[in-house]
Amino acid sequence: MQKKEIKKIVLIGTPNCGKTTIFNALTGKHQYIGNWPGVTVKTAIGTFNKFKNIILVDTPGLYTLSSSSEQQDLDIKKVLSESDLVINVLAASNIQQNLFLTLSLREAGIPMIVLITMADIARKESKYTIQTRTLSRLLAVPILGIHPHNKNDIQQATQFIFENIRTPYTTTKTMLTQYPDDIEKIIEEYASIIHTPQTPQVISDRFLALSLLEKNNYGIKKLHDISKSSSPEEEKNKPASHFSKEHIQSMLDAIVEHHKCSIDILLQQSKVSTIQSILRKIIDQYPHYSSRKNASSLSEKIDRIVLHKYLGIPLFFLILYILFGLTIHIGNVFTEFFTTIASALFVESPAFILNNINAPDWITRVISQGMGRGVQTVFSFIPIMFPIFFMLTILRSSGYMARIAYIMDRVMRRLGLPGNAFIPMMIGFGCTVPAIMATDTLEHKKDRYFTMFLTPFMSCGARFSVYVLFGLVFFERHAGLMAVSLYVIGILMAVGTGLIVKKSLFNAPPAPLIMELPHYHLSSLTYLLKISTSQLRFFLKGTGKTIILLMFFLSALGSIPITRSVADNDSSPLSLPMWIGKTSSPLFTPLGIEKENWPAVLALMTGGLAKEVIVATLNNFYPPSSSRQDSASELQTNKPENPQHILSGLLQIAYRSVLRAGQELFSSFSSRIHKSTATPASSNSFFRLRAAFNNDWVHAYAYLLFVLLYFPCVAVLSVLIKKTNLLFTILAVLYPTVLAWSVSTLFFQIMRAHNLWLIVTACAMMLAFIPLFHIARKSIMR
Amino acid sequence: MKLTEVLKGHSTIVTGIGEDLSIRRKLMAFGIIPGSLTRVLQSNNKNLILLSVMNRGVIIEKTIAQNITVSHIK
């Protein structure tokens, strides 16, 4: 056994084996998404909580170490060769398939350990248990069985990893799979050509030889290239009969003739035999568990309903309705509570303190009305975003998300996309950035571009916060229906766009789909809460910085007059945000946004940075009820000099706010329980917002349509540029924005204004993109 | 017979996976190779077929499944 130091540990396993769960548990908060330098394999990198010099790398799920892409092949080998230890996560519930990857890793000869997960699922669904010690002996690697959600198991796994880090074991037993003699001979031929003593490799020559052999004729070509690239020194050390293309080809032809089967199938069949012999030794009931003809696991029973030809899609939309309906109701109940508490802490209290120490008005405005309102806005997202993340986590961890590919396939095919293209779109309901990144799972470039073009039409959680705000103010009991209608319109817009662009911009057949469906799994509440909280924290951290900074600048700029209004009867000073809003507002008049409603226009512009900022901007320029200001101003007028009065004033603010928040919470709860028509107290606090939109739901809905459809935020655009090109990104900005303007205008004009010219203009602008898509096709897809 | 001709609920053994190298590698990655056991779980979708392979659900497009030849288990 050899020993060496460890710096880099790589987690490798098949998709849905629990690899990322283990990664998250081991690294906690100490992780980030990154790329392994010089490769295209997307990895998450973290450090152990206690040992910062040990890096843990999570890789995408792999079924095999051989990829259909040459670049990805090289990248996988680079990742393996540069790691000091490989942790192979093996799912016991699918051990037969997982062992293919394990055997390949063992053949590579890299120091490795195995963590076995999902033993409980194997026991419950397939009624077998694995003898871990026997498996460890057969594979000659240390093995530990764990449950990734169990804290004690994770501690045990950490200890296990550290024991193997300090003294990692490599073994000479690299040859686990015994191939037929003629194949073993050609493996040796290949290995001798690949072998270069002057440049020792971490990965075994045998493994590299097998990788080439699997590629049949293409492998011969690569072998020829390797042979030609040998240095003169290496040439001397090669055996006399080293490479002759004809010699190798004749050997391969003889093998195929003898076995009546291609080389890649032969190699795979040998692996299958090896795996079956291993399984016979480690599973008592083998092979009976795998060949039960009438076996019908729980997952299959559920799939009979979930994947039913007629019930599948309605069930999916019902789940969507429950998901967003629940989120709206939970958001409605708790939003005011969080807003009130945050207002007391970050708006009223700082304002009171600053006023009482005679701070300049502009400082009070910037800190209290600016940054304070920004923090208040961030707090208001908590009751909205947490339910969304929680629901999406349930869908993902339960295994239902993968079924959506099957359910939505027929719809997606009409657009020219495979069914699994809907999964990134589904992720887009939470946040568009990870949704765009999830398109990496799609094989063809055209499918990835197409999906990235359509995904922003799925309303993200940030847009949802705007829907909740307007729902509270304008739609009350029908807020849930309003939100669902927007989501449906978003999906319909995506479908409509897809039908147009599939014949122009993305005119190519979709990639054939092969995909695994994981078993259904009910995660523990602790796990669901942990993942959702982690996602919420990540979301708040990212958006919080943007919102607070932006609110700081907006309120600072808002305090500084730069010019005077040139409108009749109005010589009031204009700040920069005011000037921008007022100057741009004529563009939005066709949508029903009045000229004086410039904060709404400004909010749309700041929403280009992050959609969450729309709510923050509206909060800044349409503050909540004057009653709150009165309670603070009452205290301010006294302006006591004695600091103790400041303290008593703060205590009074705190007391009144807690009382008010509690009353609002109780009121929200009881109005839902009793399904009363009484308006929740919360709606009254946004009277300025209601007045700005003429107290009219049509004005509000037209605004929401624009918010739904216009270009995504800066974070999404930066990811799009990285993954595609500048022209694609420009189109991804221009098209949705024009569409948003046109759809909102059409809605408002048809419902209220009836201006025919504007209706015609809106239609013409949408139709103008059809020839543009055809023209842009080649440049976009270069 | 082709896999696409197998009725729902029937178990079969794979006898062939076509000649296209990229499709073969995809199928092999999911454990679908000559000799592996498969059972058709759902075939009601126009484009997709849902199989159980090594006790695992796998969705395969019918255009790919047409390359797979099987025989019924006796």
Image (cartoon, coloured by chain):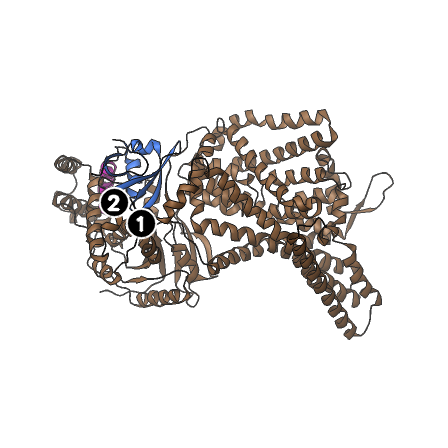
Chain colours: A brown, B blue
User: Disc 1 on helix, strand or loop?
Assistant: helix
Range shown magenta: A208-228
| Crowd band around label 2 with a 10 angstrom C-alpha radius: few (<14), some (14–19), many (20+) | some
Kind of residue indicated by mark 2: Ser
Question: Residue at label 1?
Answer: A77
Asked whether the residues under the numbered discs 1 and 2 touch, taking CB atoms below 8 Å apart as contact, a structural biologist would say yes
Q: Is residue A344 left or right of residue A251?
A: right
Residue found at the far front of this picture: A674
Is A157 situated left or right of B16 in this image?
right
In the figure, A586 relative to A607: above or below? above
Residue A647 as seen in the image, left or right of residue A296: right
- Residue A224 belongs to magenta span: yes
Q: Name the chief secondary structure element in magenta.
A: helix
Residue ID at (55%, 58%) = A537
**Looking at the picture, how far across and down is residue A759, in whole percent?**
68, 27
State whether residue A363 is above or below residue A733: below
Q: Is residue A688 left or right of residue A411?
A: right
Residue B46 location, x and y as percent? 40, 31
Q: Chain of mark 1?
A: A
Measuring from the top left, give residue A406's x and y in whole percent. Answer: 42, 39
Give the answer, above or below, for where A672 lies relative to A692.
below
Question: Which quadrant is the N terminus of chain A positioned in?
Answer: bottom left
What residue is disc 2 on? A211
Residue sitting nearer the eye, A690 or A51? A690
**Residue A733: in magenta span:** no
